[in-house]
Image (cartoon, rainbow, N blue to C red):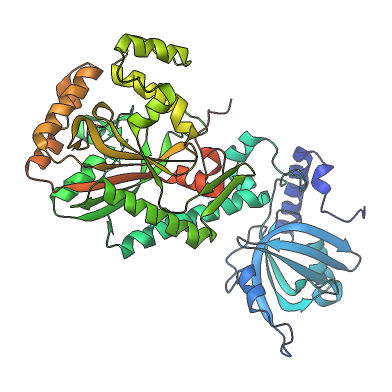
Amino acid sequence: MNKENKENIVQEVPPEDIFAQRMSKVNEIVSAGDTPFGSAFPDTIAVNDVKESFVEDSEEEQKVVIAGRITAFRVMGKSIFADVKDSCDRMQVYVKKNDLGDDEFAKFKKLDIGDIIGVKGALFVTRMGELTVKVEEYSLLSKSLRPLPEKWHGLTDIEQRYRQRYLDLIVNEKSRDVFIKRCSIIREIRKFLETKGFIEVETPMLQPMAGGAAAKPFETYYDALHSPMFMRIAPELYLKRLLVGGFEKIYELNRNFRNEGMSRRHNPEFTMIEIYQAYGDCRTMMDLIEELVTTVAMNVFGTLVIEHSEDKIIDLTRPWKRAPYKDLVREKAGSDWFDISFEERVAKGKDLGLKVDTTMPDFEVTNEVYEKLIENTLFQPTFVTRLPAELVPLAKACEDDPTLVDVFELEINGQEIAPGYSELNDPIEQRRRFEEQAAREGGDAAEKIDEDFLVALEHGMPPAGGMGIGIDRLVMMLTGAESIRDVVLFPQLRPKK
């Protein structure tokens, strides 16, 4: 290997020594009257735009201004080839001693992989056919004091990828692409809803009562009001207040917080979008999300067939399957499941390997069958409908069976992507359900019931369809990511000891 080739130097020198060496270079730069951390570099052009606009047969010299991080550095006597990478792409630059002069060439030669530079020069194509910038001027914009992860192996420690996401984004093209796709997905969702006449609204993240879902909240204290407060677990009850106020087609792209466990599919801070449409119902929401997801998939990925692996391929082609909750339970636990006694259901549940007992409510025993044995098998898009009323206290009952509610859970990739409801707008029935839920949970019922929300309902809320879409899980499904941590830029982690 050429001893001047810096491309692999980070493999050979301990990180602490590299830091010391680069600090020494910083001192040299300062002593020479220059700055290792430069100012703005105006008129820069994105590398992909440079490549797209290049005219190979042009007789005129094409000058460009680019900036980015050095990711490769090859010294070849009196010339240097380096790769400069911006947020979009990589561009090779060529530095010649005769063009820059002895002093500037010597300074450029002391640059390191990881340094951020700005370059001005003319485009040309090398004998190897690579579009390159012949450097006429350059500026050091930010000196990198620490080495990047070794080029060929990158970040092999998964936890380090999450803790130092900035390094993951620098060296891992696949990870970078996932987050660019995530941004595109969110942009397309907004665009789709706006074309359908929905308006985007905002509701409080800090709330006096944590409502709209069954989850443990994060608690805090508001000194100015001398009052306990909660980070929201869902925006639902505030969005419904807006339905009462006459906002008929609304959505909120929001952050929610639930003080619960972390897993491959759960992060305590997560992104959802909640959508409400007055005068609709859960079937309105089914049609909406089918069209939304397929539109986003086509616009971002150009296909409705999402390949996770050779044996896991999701087909989003419409229409999607619709299956009643009870039918799925019967298929897994036996056709007589709902005909036998509660004690027999518990015994059968144990035979199926479930952790159930007779101290649990009957509906929870059945739901263990669904959550543990059915949900993770629903890989292709499936609307699970007609759930037990106890599971969803904010939805309308089915007209033919008041023990069930007119809702769906959209399952794709073995996990819930979106629940949707025919929203309950009867304040009398809503109060009764809140009271039942509070009684099951124990404690002071008055502290668990949102009276302000009930007062709003008592003024009259139109019938409506409502839906929440888990953005993180949607991105997992569309990109093939295996863990929610792979689609959240900065996932929650245990404090580093």
The residue located at (51%, 55%) in the rendering is: 304
Q: Quadrant of residue 4?
A: bottom right
Q: Along the horizontal axis of the image, is 456 left or right of 216?
A: left
Looking at the picture, does residue 73 appear above or below residue 127? above
Q: Along the horizontal axis of the image, is 29 left or right of 460?
A: right
Looking at the picture, does residue 77 appear above or below residue 211? below
| Residue 139: % across, % down | 68, 67
The residue located at (64%, 75%) in the rendering is: 52
| Residue 440: % across, % down | 23, 18
Q: Nearer the viewer, residue 39 or 200?
A: 200
Q: Along the horizontal axis of the image, is 491 left or right of 165?
A: left
The residue located at (58%, 39%) in the rendering is: 162
Q: Nearer the viewer, residue 338 or 412?
A: 338
Tally of numbered tags: 0
Quadrant placement of the C terminus:
top right
Residue sticking out furthest to the front: 335
| Residue 402: % across, % down | 18, 30
Looking at the picture, does residue 361 appear above or below residue 324? above
Residue sticking out furthest to the bottom: 59
Note whether residue 19 is visible. Answer: yes
The residue located at (35%, 14%) in the rendering is: 345
Q: Along the horizontal axis of the image, is 337 left or right of 99?
A: left
Note whether residue 260 is visible. Answer: no
| Residue 161: % across, % down | 62, 40
Looking at the picture, does residue 59 appear above or below residue 497? below
Q: Quadrant of residue 328?
A: top left
Q: Quadrant of residue 294?
A: bottom left
